[in-house]
Image (cartoon, rainbow, N blue to C red):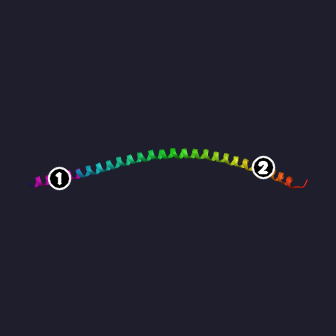
């Protein structure tokens, strides 16, 4: 009887340890799968963000180029307006001088 009780105790302890080990293995496996999915999602998101950043940088280069063109045109208009104002001032001075 003592051997049977000891045997039952050992079997129950073994089943309990194996059950605990299996549950820990399953939890770690689920955690690992979840982490691998999350890492995959983050890598995909990182690639998308990199593409968006590259696109924004390219658009910024184009925008800077267009801005320089606009600034050059504004400067040209400013020079032309200065010339027109100078001509108008000279004409006005000629009209005010007694002949």
Horizontal placement of 36 versus 59: left or right?
Answer: left
Q: Earlier in the sequence, mark 2 or mark 1?
A: 1
Residue lying at 59% horizontally and 47% vertically, measured from the top left: 60
Residue lying at 76% horizontally and 48% vertically, measured from the top left: 80
Magenta range is: 2-18
Q: Secondary structure at mark 1?
A: helix
Q: Is residue 46 magenta?
A: no
Quadrant holding the N terminus:
bottom left
Between 76 and 28, which is closer to the camera in this rendering?
A: 76
| Disc 2: CA contacts within 10 A as few (<14), some (14-19) or many (>=20) | few
Residue lying at 86% horizontally and 55% vertically, measured from the top left: 96
Residue 94 location (% of width, % of height): 86, 52
Q: In the rendered picture of this protein, how many numbered marks are placed on residues?
A: 2
Could you tell me if the residues under marks 2 and 1 are in contact, i.e. CB atoms within 8 Å?
no
Between 19 and 44, which is closer to the camera in this rendering?
A: 44
Between 45 and 2, which is closer to the camera in this rendering?
A: 45
Q: Which residue is mark 1?
A: 12
Residue 57 location (% of width, % of height): 57, 46
Residue 6 location (% of width, % of height): 14, 54
| Disc 1: CA contacts within 10 A as few (<14), some (14-19) or many (>=20) | few
Label 2 – label 1 distance at C-alpha: 105 Å
Q: Which residue is mark 2?
A: 84
Horizontal placement of 74 versus 41: left or right?
Answer: right
Q: In terms of secondary structure, what is the magenta stretch mainly?
A: helix
Q: Secondary structure at mark 2?
A: helix
Residue 55 lies in what quarter of the image?
top right
Q: Residue furthest front?
A: 99
Between 85 and 36, which is closer to the camera in this rendering?
A: 85
| Numbered label attached to residue 56 | none
Q: Is residue 7 magenta?
A: yes
Horizontal placement of 87 versus 16: left or right?
Answer: right
């Amino acid at each position: 009887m003592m051997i049977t009780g000891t045997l039952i105790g050992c079997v129950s302890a073994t089943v309990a340890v194996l059950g605990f080990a299996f549950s820990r293995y399953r939890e770690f496996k689920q955690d690992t799968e979840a982490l691998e999915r999350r890492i995959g999602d983050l890598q995909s998101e990182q690639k998308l963000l990199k593409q968006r950043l590259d696109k924004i940088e390219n658009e910024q280069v184009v925008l800077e180029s267009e801005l320089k063109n606009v600034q050059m045109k504004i400067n040209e208009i400013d020079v032309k307006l200065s010339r027109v104002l100078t001509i108008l001032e000279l004409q006005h001075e000629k009209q005010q001088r007694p002949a």
